[in-house]
Image (spheres, rainbow, N blue to C red):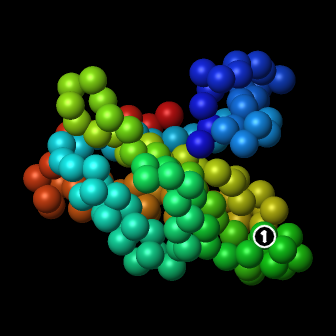
Amino acid sequence: MLDARLLGGTFGRVLWVLSPQGRLAYRMSHTDIFVNGSMENVRQAVLQAFEHNQFRVQWSSETAGKAIKGSKGKNIALGAFAQYYEMDFQIMPVADGSLALRLVQSNTGWAGGVIGATKVKRQYEDIVNGLSGYFQSQGIYKGRNQQ
């Protein structure tokens, strides 16, 4: 997960941050979804939402991971005809006892041009809205904050 608190430099209009793997990366937009519920319930909802949308989920810990759909190589070669999606996520406790699910749009889609960037943004919004709707239907949704 990218954490702007670890490194806070800017270059032009791009915020550079240090990932847990020690690599520099630029900070992408993210959404925090706040819920009441157990860590396991949120974890299962995240897994089901990504798998329903044909993402492969790679857990890096019990509460964080990456969801991937498509191929980087095909996206570079074929552009918008072979889209690549990547989202980082993390489940975090909040001071009031609830949980926050942070979803980070990890790639821009610009390898596929304007069409690719639009598709990536739309897929990200679909996942955010789907998870928010699921948590609302379960009666545990508290709200969300998009940055």
**Above/below status of 107 relative to 99:** below
Identify residue type, mark 1: Lys
Q: Nearer the viewer, residue 118 or 39?
A: 39
**Residue lying at 56% horizontally and 55% vertically, measured from the top left:** 60
User: Left or right of 121: which side holds 145?
Assistant: left
In the rendered image, residue 93, in percent from the top left (x then y), is placed at 32, 35
Q: Nearer the viewer, residue 147 or 97?
A: 97
Q: Secondary structure at mark 1?
A: helix
List the single residue furthest toward the front: 61
> Image quarter for residue 80?
bottom right
User: Left or right of 32: which side holds 115?
Assistant: right
**Residue lying at 62% horizontally and 26% vertically, measured from the top left:** 4
Q: Residues within 10 Å of mark 1 (few under 14, many from 20)?
A: some
> Image quarter for residue 49?
bottom left
In the rendered image, residue 72, in percent from the top left (x then y), is placed at 78, 70
Q: Is residue 107 visible?
A: yes
Which residue carries the number 1 mark?
Answer: 72
In the rendered image, residue 129, in percent from the top left (x then y), is placed at 36, 57
**Above/below status of 57 relative to 87:** below
Q: Is residue 144 visible?
A: no
List the single residue furthest toward the right: 77
Q: Nearer the viewer, residue 125 or 17?
A: 17
User: Left or right of 134: which side holds 47?
Assistant: right
**Residue lying at 29% horizontally and 39% vertically, measured from the top left:** 99
Q: How many marks?
A: 1
In the rendered image, residue 9, in percent from the top left (x then y), is placed at 76, 19
**Residue lying at 71% horizontally and 30% vertically, measured from the top left:** 17
Q: Nearer the viewer, residue 128 or 62?
A: 62
List the single residue furthest toward the left: 139
